[in-house]
Each structure stands twice: as structure tokens, then as C-alpha cells.
Amino acid sequence: MKIKAAVCRAPHAPQSFEELELEEPRANEIVVKIKSCGVCHTDMGMRDQVYPVPQPIVLGHEGAGFVEKVGSGVTTVAPGDPVLLTINSCGKCPACLNGKYGLCHLFWSLNFAGSRLDGTSPLSKGGEMIHGNFFGQSSFATYAMANERNVLKLDTTEDMDYLGPLGCGVMTGAGAVINVFKVRPGDSIVAFGMGTVALSAIMGARVCGATTIVAVGRNDKKLATAKEVGATHTINSTKVPDVVKAIKDLTNGRGVNYAVDTTAVQSIMTRSVECLENGGKAVILGASGQGTRVDLDAVDFMNCGKTILGAIEGNCVPQEFLPRLITLYRQGRFPLDKIVTFYPFDKLNEAMEDGENGRVIKAVVKM
Ligand SMILES: [Zn+2]
Ligand SMILES: [Zn+2]
């Protein structure tokens, strides 16, 4: 079938809107009519080749829409069902069997390779292969080819344009706090970098009952949003000479139980460990360039019994975890609508630019 898609043909360049051909679904594939799709910093990163994804490619990996067609083996959804799209995974490796789909041993091949495992793409243009299957979807398009393993059926449709970002950015931040740290009532936590992932970590921390939730960023408007969604304290790092001291001052000199870094900036990853209380844990969630190292004070690290860990996509089974967040959102306890700004699909390049310049937190394009 003919679809309209945003095609990324070169790094650091706008995507072009082109008419492409989408294949018929194979046995476990699902064609989804995309209604809206969140813009994640990973889209910009892959456009600019932070990781070597092949181009031309259709990006977009926080899609929400309606099932259009299903392959012969699909049993969990049917045409007309509203769905969210999320990360793809194999379902068979030790990580998948342990319920951590983001750690799937085939994560790269299934989400970043720009093709099915057999090397084919469902997208083409007059015989030219256009890479698809980005996060098992490529949702910056009017229709996307998803897979049975990366769809989540929704029970209602009225708020679905707000829910697409759950499939990656929101799941990453909230999942780190809820599933990885397992924050408890009364805990203290800091989040660095005021994008979707950090703000979702803050929302997750409030849901868990954390009582000291510190937001660290450089933009006063975003810090004000952080306060609206759950931060108890904010620190503008451009105005405070020593951020680690400022965090310790908020916690009787002890430091925080947990720190979330979403910046991928080496010096901030170091600070996220330095600001921990004895026995505290820091998690790295930002997409660093290849070769980035973390610099630790080994004496402080050992003597204070600190932990630093990585996590990806919330270390969860999205089909189990996301419905919990959706319920919290509908109860007003996980206010992700406060971070969303909508754009029409043909303003995707502008939406990306606004995200990169910090003018918006989570852009969502509507098809
Ligand atoms: Zn797997
Ligand atoms: Zn993402």
C-alpha cells in the first residue's frame, strides 16, 4: 500500500516527506494506521548517526494508532483495535525470559538495524530500499509495520495521543525509578537533565512516595514544569556553583538515596554518583556517544558503598508495565500531559528542532 513517511536521508538534515510503498504484513506483523507519534531524542541521535543506523530510514518509535491489517499468525489484536507501539524484542533470550525486554540480546538487530532479521525492509520507493523496522515500527509515517511483540492494545481512545511517549521515553524514566530502584516512601532522589526521561523519573518518584525529589537542569521553564509534575526542589545548574553541595544541603548533608542521569554528559554522570548518600544508587539513562567513559572517585565509591548501573527502556515488560502508568495518568497521578506539545505531522522537522533547543519537552506529531 502507498503511505506518506518522513524519510531521513542524511545526518543533520531535515527529513523529507515522501510517498513510499509498504509491504503486506508477514505472519507476525501488524500494519498500524498511525494517529500520532512522540519525538524522542533517540530519533535526533539516529538522524545524526550517534549510532550507525543505515539511511535512508524512516524513524519514529513512540507511535499510537489503529490496527489496519494483521498477519496470518497474529492473535492478540485485530483490525480496528487502538494500540500503542513500543520497543521490539525477541521473546526467547535470557533477558526477555527474565522480563527485561530492553536488555534483549537482539535489541540492536530488532530496533536499530533498519530491517527485519532477514535483512529485508517492508518499505521501498520505486525499487529503492528504504530502511524501516526502526524500533519495530518506523512511525513517522501514516502507516507503520509493527510486530505482535511490540504492540499494546488500549481499552479507550480519547487520550491516546498523549500515550505514545509511554512506549520509550516515559517508560525509560519511570521504569528506572519504579522497577530498577524500587523507590520507597520517604526516599530521596535527584534527576539530572530536564527532558522527558528525567521528568518521567520525577513523576515515578512521586508515585512511589519519595519525599525529597530534586530536579537539576539549566532551563527555568522546564524546572518549573518539574515542580508541577512532582519535584520538591529545583536547582538551576547554571546559577549554582557546586551542584553536589546544593543537593547535599537539601538532605542534611547526607546526599540522596538515588540519582538519575539522563544527560549523557560525563561530568554530570560523575556528579550523579558524588551526590549519593552512603549505599545510594545512580542510574545512567542518557544515550552517550560511542566511547564515552564514566569517571569515578574509587575511594568514595567503595567506602560509601555506592552503586552505579545502566538501565534501558525501564527494564520491564511494556505490556505489563505501561497499563499501570496509563491508570496512574488517568487518575491524575502521573501527569504526562503537562510535558506534551502537539505538532502536525508535516512540522516534524520543526518539532525536532524545538526539542533540541529546549523550547518543548515532549513533542508529539499528529498524522
Ligand atoms: Zn530477547
Ligand atoms: Zn526513544
Image (tube, rainbow, N blue to C red):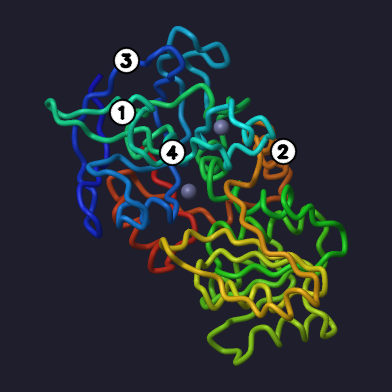
Q: What element carries label 3?
A: loop
- Which of the image's four quarters has the N terminus? top left
Q: Is mark 4 on a helix, strand or loop?
A: helix
Q: Distance between the residues labelled 1 and 2?
A: 35 Å
The residue closer to the viewer here, 107 or 241, is 107
Residue at 64 percent across and 39 percent down: it is 100
Residue at 52 percent across and 19 percent down: it is 81
Label 4, residues with CA under 10 Å away: few <14, some 14-19, many ≥20: many
Q: How far apart are marks 3 and 2 (CA)?
A: 33 Å
Horizontal side of 210 relative to 193 (left or right) equals right
Identify the residue under disc 3. Answer: 24
What amino acid type is highlighted by mark number 3? Glu
Sequence-wise, the earlier of marks 4 and 3 is: 3
Q: How far apart are marks 4 and 2 (CA)?
A: 24 Å
What amino acid type is highlighted by mark number 4? Asn
Identify the residue under disc 1. Answer: 119
Residue at 32 percent across and 46 percent down: it is 53
